[in-house]
Image (cartoon, grey):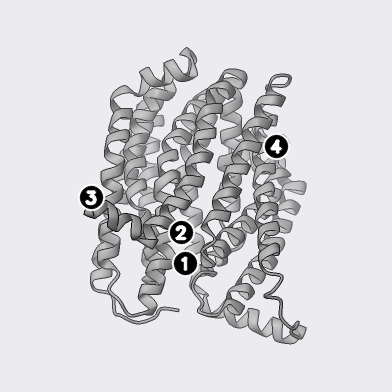
Amino acid sequence: MKRLKQLKQSKFARNVIIVASGTAMAQVLGVIFTPIITRLYGPEAYGLMGAFIALSTMASSTSALTYPQAIILPKKDSDAKDIARLSVYISLIIASLAAIVIWFGGDSLFILLGAQAIAAFGMLIPLKMLFSAWLRIGQQWFLRKKKFKSSAKVEVLNSFFVNVSNIIVGLFKPLASVLIVFHTLGIGLQVLMFYVSRGKSNKIERKKIRPEKEKAASLIQLAKKYYDFPLYRAPVVLIEDISSNLPVLVLAALFGPASAGFYVLGFKLLKAPSKLIGRSVANVFYPKITQSAHDGKNIRPLIIKATMGLAGAGIIPYTAIVIFGPWVFKIVFGPEWVTAGEYARWIALNSFFQFIYRPSAVAIITLGLQKEFLIYEVLSTILEIAVLYTGFVIFRSDIIAVALFSSAYAISLFSLTAYVIYAAKNAVKQERY
């Protein structure tokens, strides 16, 4: 009872609950609607959507060179706003360049990537790149201002819009194009909701407009100050997204869209706990440990405590999927999705370690371990590509490939989490930014 009372009085715990409640509602809506969507569209449509999401996510991962993640770090709001502005300009340039490349050389590019099936949706990729960059800006600004309730509302409304739209249109046109279009529009809707919410709350904060030269000088200065984001963080995020999305593209290319659809469904559902609790903890944890670092405090105990708490929360549900995965997927989603349950058994392994890694992921930025993280991502991705090659080419088995990939991914994440905790112990108590 004493522990529960302390938890109730904890501001950190309350903020986690607020963020988690919004994510929980969004995930609950997704889980409720998914059995209907899977019966309307089928594995092939799901697989094509998954291939589009995989490719567009890789392209979107560095559409603002990860500068939005630096929005939380400055002490002054004026600097944070300038970082947001810098991110917008960079995203416009990169998305425009991507549109030009796809317009003139898209067919050859999709053939090279083995993704000819989604070539028709190529021009949606630059649009998603733009929306994704702006979404990250909105999310990070809301985290900085600790607007956890507003952020939660945005997530719930977006989930409702996307799922209901997929079902309504799917009753008449159950095509992959419907899933792909509403996936992209959903991100745009989130951006719009963040903008509207921010506009209402910041009318009072508007100040005298600075001269253009002063604005430009400030942007250049901040771009140089946070140089390690485009130099180290951006390649890390790109490699990380390539690594996590590679199985979908390989399955689609070698075993067909249906196999990719099985993987996408299993991956989507097993990411739910990570979004529900892990990301909620991370979103509240990031500003908390950043402030602790500014105050010269030791953040290692905070990382350990958060990691162990997530491990305790995740061990039972993930173990249940390992044991009952195929049976659960058959009952909930239909007999044609049993293979997705087989995949899910192995996906659960790496999902668990991804779940408990969340506190370490945000601590990497605060501890200034961007360079080390880049080295880790390069080495782990080489390992994951090697095991995928072994499963697909040598064993010629999709199940073995998924099993090897998930095991390698889990080992890599466990090693990284241990390293971050070790680095936090030996960190010099000084402000990185």
User: Where is residue 23 shown, x and y percent of the image?
Assistant: 49, 45
* Amino acid bearing label 1: Tyr
- Please report contact status of discs 4 and 3: CB closer than 8 Å, yes or no: no
Task: Give above or below for 375 relative to 262.
Answer: below
**In the rendered structure, are the residues bearing label 2 and label 1 in contact, judged by CB atoms less than 8 Å apart?**
yes
Label located before the other in sequence (1 or 3): 3
Relative placement, left or right, of 9 versus 280 is left
Q: Which of marks 3 and 2 is in front?
A: 3
For the residues labelled 4 and 3, the Cα–Cα distance comes to 49 Å
Q: Name the residue under label 4.
A: 181
Quadrant in which residue 147 is drawn: bottom right
**Residue at 60% across, 33% down:** 49
The span from disc 2 to disc 4 (Cα, nearest Å) is 28 Å
Separation (CA) of disc 2 from disc 1: 6 Å
Number of residue marks: 4
For label 4, count other residues whose C-alpha is less than 10 Å away and answer few (under 14), some (14-19) or many (20+): some
Q: Read off the residue under disc 1.
A: 232
The location of residue 357, given as percent across then percent down, is 34, 52
Residue type at the position of mark 2: Val
- Residue 205 position (above or below residue 401): below
Image-based side of 130 in relation to 320, left or right: right
Q: Mark 2 points at which residue?
A: 236
Q: What residue type is labelled 3?
A: Met
Q: Name the residue under label 3.
A: 1
Q: Quadrant of residue 42?
A: top right
Q: Earlier in the sequence, mark 3 or mark 2?
A: 3
Question: At numbered mark 3, what does the secondary structure look like: helix, strand or loop?
Answer: loop
**Residue at point 68%, 31% (across, down):** 165
